Amino acid sequence: MAMQIADSVSLSVSDAKARAAAARDNLRTEPRAVRIVIIALAVTFLTVFVVLPLVVVFAHAFSKGILAYLAALAEPEALAAIRLTLLVAAISVGLNLVFGLVAAWAIAKFDFPGKTFLITLIDLPFSVSPVISGLVFVLLFGAQGYFGGWLRDHDIQILFAVPGIALATTFVTFPFVARALIPLMQEQGTQEEEAAISLGASGLQTFFRVTLPNIKWGVLYGVLLCNARAMGEFGAVSVVSGHIRGETNTMPLLVEILYNEYHFVAAFAIASLLAMLALITLIAKTVLERHLDEGYAGDH
Amino acid sequence: MSAIAARRRTLPGFGLTMGLTLSWLSVMILIPLAGLFLKSLELSPEQFWNILSSRRTLNALRVSFGLAFAAACINLVMGSIIVWALVRYRFPGRRLFDAIVDVPFALPTAVAGVALTALFAEKGWLGAPLAALGIKVAFTPVGIFVAMIFIGIPFVVRTVQPVLQDLDPEIEEAAGSLGANRWQTITRVILPSLAPALLTGLALAFARAVGEYGSVIFIAGNLPNVSEIAPLLIVIRLSEFRYADATAIAVVMLVVSFVVILAVNRLQRWAQSRVPAR
Amino acid sequence: MTIEVRNLVKTFGSFKALDGVDLKVDSGELVALLGPSGSGKTTLLRIVAGLDWPDAGEVLINGEDALAQGARERHVGFVFQHYALFRHMTVFENVAFGLRVQPRVVRKDEAAIRARVKELLDLVQLDWLSDRYPSQLSGGQRQRIALARALAIEPRILLLDEPFGALDAKVRKELRKWLRSLHHEINVTSIFVTHDQEEALEVANRVVVMDKGRIEQIGSPDDVYESPASAFVHGFIGESIELPVRVEGGVIRLGGRPLALAADGLAPGASRLFVRRHDMLVGPPGSGAFEGIVHHVRNFGPVQRAEVALSDGKTIEIDAPRDKELRAGDTIGLEPRRYRIFAG
């Protein structure tokens, strides 16, 4: 008898627990059918709009076999485009890295009026159409541009040459490094730097021994995204490049030319390299974000 | 006392870094953009108006802005669904799908353009079944729409996701304990909390789609007045050496982008003002 | 090393953080800056360290104009509230930092640096942690490493900003004793900032009480507790009963009723009467300056704390010895053993 009571008590206790858990779940989630529909919608949408386009690139690139693929990449035109893309990315990333570090130091470590406005200005290129980013340099350096006459007189070629491509690319990738560093450095504050200074370190010693080690993942993150965009930029570069074969075609521009000439395998072969760059960038980004979260968490 | 007058800053390098920042910003960004506006001032208001009110320009702007807005709306709805699934549910492949949301950010636009075209062309994997249903995507305005949806996905997802993640679970429990059913909790408590982020995502997706070039031109068909986007018209005018036309269209698009940035800044201030003080 | 500040003024926007502060610290002293948050104590400390700059005034370290030097040249040891340990460096490298960044001509060689760091880690009794990173340490350990790091440069003076602020109560108490004995050992002129009166009274030789950017009182721990110089100090240090009174014609009135308390030398007008809780002596009804009804009694360690409604309606809390029998509903007389009256 006593045992029966004990049983029923424990039963009702676990019942109550289960009901409480179910009730709590009910407050914060939806019926199973709704959940399945939502997941199915999300997965289908992402598959159609993101996964399939990626798969298509590789399917077309290898549609005539691996030899045709490799042959397309070994074309002199393709190699020239790869070289130019690497060169331009190196210039743009280098310039924006130095700028990003300098700007982030000024913005994150000091207080001054108009800071928000300055950040908005640095962000501007994000909201300018790539075509317009190219156009502004045509208006400055083109034959009819503000400096066009002067450049012609001094025989300096900017447009339809590497300097123009590098300029346009630097313009569109301008904010990446600075934007990766400013919030990180603001979050980390100035205490460690103040400590270093009060211990007798110089400004450069403070930057290289204290600040830089603390933001290294942020720097890598900014460089990574900056590089991906620099190598993949199409619209801005298309406007300033002049499409001179073997000379001013970057990889994305070559994709367009080959595609328009119906060299589909070659076009998709180059495209597949760029797609791989994007995928590697994303993987590296995911890894870096984990490190960055630690940097943000700090150890206060 | 002179040391005080200088109001020294503790950390060194402010003057130098700020000077470099402003100089480089001016040279790289502000002067080129100012040049564009200066160029447009060379046009008389009448010339400016004539360029913009020409049928082809109007149609290009209509196609760009109209389809960009429609695509941003689709992104708003589908982006919310994706965020909800990624944040609230556990399903196989969730982390993978979370990661690939960024593909449209990272994939060069030209690659996206040729890939979408191949996919939706009449003989493509998706184009063929759609064609059988009588829907033509590639080389029509629908193609532009599809490309704009593609590039807008990450904007909504990545602005809304952190906000939903940080949403205090207690507010939902509070709503439930006060007798709200799930639908009421979502529409009256959660959605209003997400509103600034949703609108920001919408604005960002719209701004990106309006200016988009690479992923659109391959699939668009580029038929004047029908499937020709404004950025392409700028490129065409440039290649015809009609710089005035290109400049006028560019100025209109830039002004719209700036208005969108202002709106986004306002939205963010609004969102911040609603974060309760801790 | 002496520290002297004269007429220091510092504003942040419209907020006056320091409003004409004068202070002199003698060689070898351990001084506490005590005050509520926003009283300007941390600003004062940071200005002495060269981490902030005043709008006006002078800072002299050992008689020399410190404002002519940046933080880097001042040779001041500063311990930050949140320690500001370099998170990517080991404990050893943190402590060694100040030695490694010295100009090459005066820099010690590696062996000497190692020896010095070891000595400092021994001093703070954390030699065994030298290979750890700051994130692997407890709060108290970080605090001591931050101190060792500041001492590594053989600072002329030592400044500590809320040194125990981020620690839990037990560790705080241990570290207080430790800091006092460490100061005794190294005898560096030191200033520390705290908002905790117990900490200030227990550790410091002298206490500087600050409020709203001004110094309210400077004195020994006994001075500031036993003879507060202002209403603020009386209210801030120790637990006080505060009653609004009027001084009129040599009489102190509470709510119009005259109190049997001496009013010699008091300026007429609205004033505030302060009495320590344990200085209110309980007697039979009608026996003291006040009369009231006990509402509530609770034992509180060695004393009993009673809530008493005075006859004019104001409720106060007093601490009475446990042997005194007090019950709710009793009418009692109250006589302040000691009291102070401040105008205003």
Image: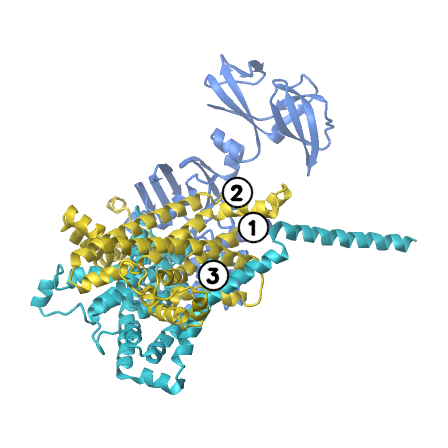
Residue for point 59% across, 16% down: C260
Q: Position of residue A159 (x, y in %)?
A: 18, 67
Q: Quadrant of the N terminus of chain B?
A: top left
Residue for point 22% across, 77% down: A245
Q: Nearer the viewer, residue B141 or A79?
A: B141
Residue found at the far bottom of this picture: A67
Which of pointers 2 and 3 indicates the residue nearer the eye? 3
Residue at the spot of label 1: C172
At label 1, which amino acid type do we have?
Answer: Arg
What is the letter of the cyan chain? A
Q: CA distance from mark 1 to mark 2?
A: 11 Å
| Discs 1 and 3 lie in a common subunit | no
Label of residue A293 in the image: 3
Question: Which quarter of the picture shows residue C325?
Answer: top right
Q: Nearer the viewer, residue B16 or C309?
A: B16
Circle 2: is it few (<14), some (14-19), or many (20+) Cα within 10 Å? some
User: Mark 2 — on which chain does it sit?
Assistant: C
What is the letter of the yellow chain? B
Question: For chain C, what colour was chosen?
Answer: blue
Q: Position of residue B120 (x, y in %)?
A: 40, 68
Residue at the spot of label 2: C196
Q: Is residue C130 above or below residue C315?
A: below
Which of pointers 1 and 3 indicates the residue nearer the eye? 3
Give whichever of discs 1 and 2 has the lower sequence position.
1
Dots 1, 2 in contact, CB < 8 A = yes
**Residue A216 shows up from this direction:** no
* Residue B196 horizontal side relative to residue A75, left or right: right
Element type at mark 2: loop
